[in-house]
Amino acid sequence: MDTGRPARVLDGLRAFYEAPASSGPDAGPAAALALFHEAAATVPAYRAFLAARGVDPAAVRDAESFGRLPLMTKADYHERYPLPERCRGGRLDACDMVAVSSGSSGRPTVWPRSVLDERLVAARFEQVFRDGFEADGRSTLAVVCFALGSWVGGMYTAACCRHLAAKGYPITVATPGNNVEEILRVVAELGPHYDQVALLGYPPFVKNVVDAGLAAGLDWRRLRIKLVLAGEVFSEQWRDLMAERAGMNRPYADAASLYGTADAGVLANETPLSARIRRFLADHPDAGRELFGESRLPTLAQYDPAARYFETDGGTLLFTGDGAVPLVRYHIADEGGLVPHDRMLAFCRDHGFDPASELAAAGVRPPLAQPFVYVFGRSLFTVSFFGANIYPENVTVGLERPGVRDWVTGKFVLSSVEDADRDRHLSVVVELAPSVAATPDRQRAAAESIRAELLRLNSEFANYVPAAFQMPLVELRPAGDPEHFPPGVKHRYTRPTAPGL
């Protein structure tokens, strides 16, 4: 029995419950360096990983030498060393529980957890609930709509929200999971007793919940709905649509996206500041391309570098963060980049936009001076068409335009297909809303809407793809179509190059 463990847990939880909102940006390199040395001394797998690459931990003394350390990946670290050896002291039984990844990029991976790991992630939830939802002064029913069980999202979210309640926030947590009927029952019965209701879940599923509530006659506006979302990039048109249907008056503060991974929980979160900047860039795609170097809009979040120290490598992200399995310069293969806080605000001012002043005028709390991370996702989720990279994010916007959005769910499958003459076409299989029938007019409207947004947002599409091939081939499938939209599994928006028509 580990007799010292209760004291460590109590000390750690006390530090979280009494902690200020965030550390300063200068704390990041020192915290990352300290974690490296601790991991090198206490984690058998990491010690062997460094030795195999000729790294002497004693020689790593500053940020420059830290930046030369080998990158961790799933393939050369997690899949090479036994799970216990990746834990401190080689002790898997020192962890409180395990979670598994979704397996969207391969075999599911086991991730040990401890109650102390939840502190760093709870701090990200705290920032969302405090700064965006003002939940320190408003009673809040937090409804966890992620799947429960061994998957990381639901259990982790519930635990972190309970930490906020223990810290003194007037938050009550309900855990119906991804059961729409149970979510609506909980919300209808308990929601009126609170100042506001927060739905936490995967964006397409939360949309299904809101739509089902409207169909059942639920008045979302009276419940003062807030949304906490994770799992995929969504457009600002989608945020506006959800604000309209759920009655959210301040979309940039009432709906927040989390950037997370099964490997380490939540890494960063949208704030009212980052969301307001993203909305400006959505309306000014030229400025977005200048800032991000892409014709698509990434998730834009802020992070505490003392908790998750980000770096970039060839246009992809890596981070260092503590946990039951410490991760040092872990390469998660997400495409994206970093923007310092002051540089971001200067960029906005140079383009005639002052988000901080605008938020202050709207009565939003002053934002923390945290750096920004932007995340596109992984390159395997794009389709190449006439040499143009077609991103699901571009197609999403087309399905969220008026005249289309009312009869689709927002899910689709994007691919490039070949006809009998060996000509390539852009194929988009679209899921219809429940009880909606496919018609030629709807098929044509979806295709024209997608084409218009591709031309507006994606300069490669506009310049590389001949006009005769710019209209996508749209196929409308019923809700829950087993081939393209099977219920209960994580949806994939792209498929490899498809066979002929």
Image: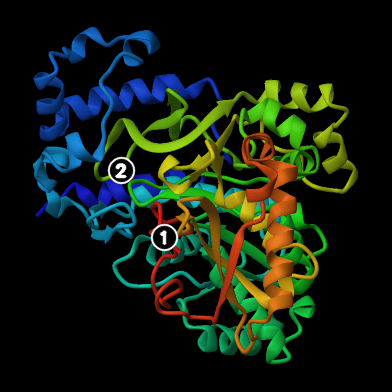
- Residue 168 showing in the rendered view: no
The label nearer to you, 2 versus 1, is 1
Question: What's the residue at 27%, 37% (across, down)?
Answer: 326
Query: Residue 266, labelled with which disc?
Result: none
Query: Alpha-carbon neighbours of circle 1 within 10 Å: few (<14), some, or many (≥20)?
Result: some
Query: Alpha-carbon neighbours of circle 2 within 10 Å: few (<14), some, or many (≥20)?
Result: many
Left or right: residue 408 versus residue 74 is right
> Hey, which residue is sitting farthest front in the picture?
421
Please say if 73 is above or below 96: above
Question: What's the residue at 41%, 65% (across, down)?
Answer: 490
Which quarter of the picture shows residue 93? bottom left
Question: Could you say where residue 21 lies in the image, as x and y percent from the top left?
Answer: 58, 41
Look at label 2 and name its amino acid.
Gly
- Residue 324 showing in the rendered view: yes
Image quarter in which the C terminus is found: bottom left
Q: Nearer the viewer, residue 284 or 309?
A: 284
Question: What's the residue at 38%, 37% (across, down)?
Answer: 333
Q: Nearer the viewer, residue 402 or 421?
A: 421
Image quarter in which the N terminus is found: bottom left
Query: Residue 500, labelled with which disc?
Result: 1
Q: Which residue is mark 2?
A: 323
Q: Nearer the viewer, residue 464 or 280?
A: 464
Of labels 2 and 1, earlier in sequence is 2
Look at label 1 and name its amino acid.
Gly
- Secondary structure beneath disc 2? loop
Question: What's the residue at 67%, 34% (across, down)?
Answer: 463
Q: Nearer the viewer, residue 14 or 92?
A: 92
